[in-house]
Amino acid sequence: MRAGNRFRFRPAVARELGPDGRDVEEKETALLFSGGAWSVLGEAADVRRSDERNTIIAALEDHGDPMTPAEIAAATGQPGVNIRRLLLKMAKAAEVHKVGKGRYWVEPLNTGNSGHSGNGGHQLRS
């Protein structure tokens, strides 16, 4: 072996597993192979999601109501411009939803007047 050659040691391998078929509900699970055994890490989408995106989702869920980018920035301690940029990307990926008047939430809200939101009781506030 020549000096300067480097080998990369990979103690763990991460993969995704999902069922395939017409009669099976689609689901992807993240797995980790380490120490000769596979471990379930969780839902693949959650594992792939960045820490910054997870922080935004946690702030929304902790608050319990839709929030503006400024409110999210204050709750997370992140710069407002970064939060606004990331919220746009997250909305495009359907990780959050714009629910009116510049507010974001983790799921779409029913804005109808039926009195039944169908979304865990969350309705858009004026």
Image (tube, rainbow, N blue to C red):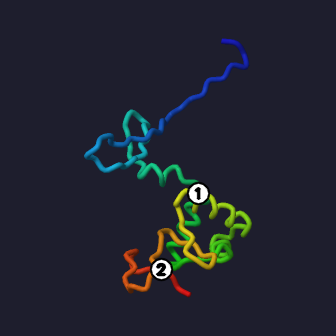
**Placement of the N terminus among the 4 image quadrants:** top right
Tag 2 secondary structure = loop
Tag 1 secondary structure = helix
N-term-proximal mark, 2 vs 1: 1
Crowding near the residue tagged with mark 1, few <14, some 14–19, many ≥20 C-alpha atoms within 10 Å? few
Residues at circles 2 and 1 in contact by the CB criterion of under 8 Å: no
In the rendered image, the residue lying farthest to the top is 1
Task: Give the distance between the C-alpha atoms of the residues marked 2 and 1, in whole angstroms.
Answer: 30 Å
In the rendered image, the residue lying farthest to the left is 23
Tell me, for residue 51, which label it has, or none: 1
Q: Amino acid at mark 1?
A: Asp
Q: Amino acid at mark 2?
A: Thr
Q: Is residue 126 above or below residue 9?
A: below
Tell me, for residue 111, which label it has, or none: 2
Q: Residue at x 50, y 34 (%)?
A: 11
Q: Residue at x 44, y 81 (%)?
A: 112
Q: Quadrant of residue 114?
A: bottom left
User: Is 12 or 46 nearer to us in this picture?
Assistant: 46
Tell me, for residue 120, which label it has, or none: none
Residue 36, given in percent of the width and then of the height, sits at 39, 33
Q: Residue at x 73, y 19 (%)?
A: 4
Residue 80, given in percent of the width and then of the height, sits at 72, 69
Residue 3, given in percent of the width and then of the height, sits at 72, 16
50 sits left or right of 13 in the view: right
Label total for image:
2
Q: Is residue 118 above or below residue 32?
A: below
Q: Is residue 13 above or below residue 53?
A: above
61 sits left or right of 38 in the view: right
**Placement of the C terminus among the 4 image quadrants:** bottom right
Q: Residue at x 65, y 61 (%)?
A: 86
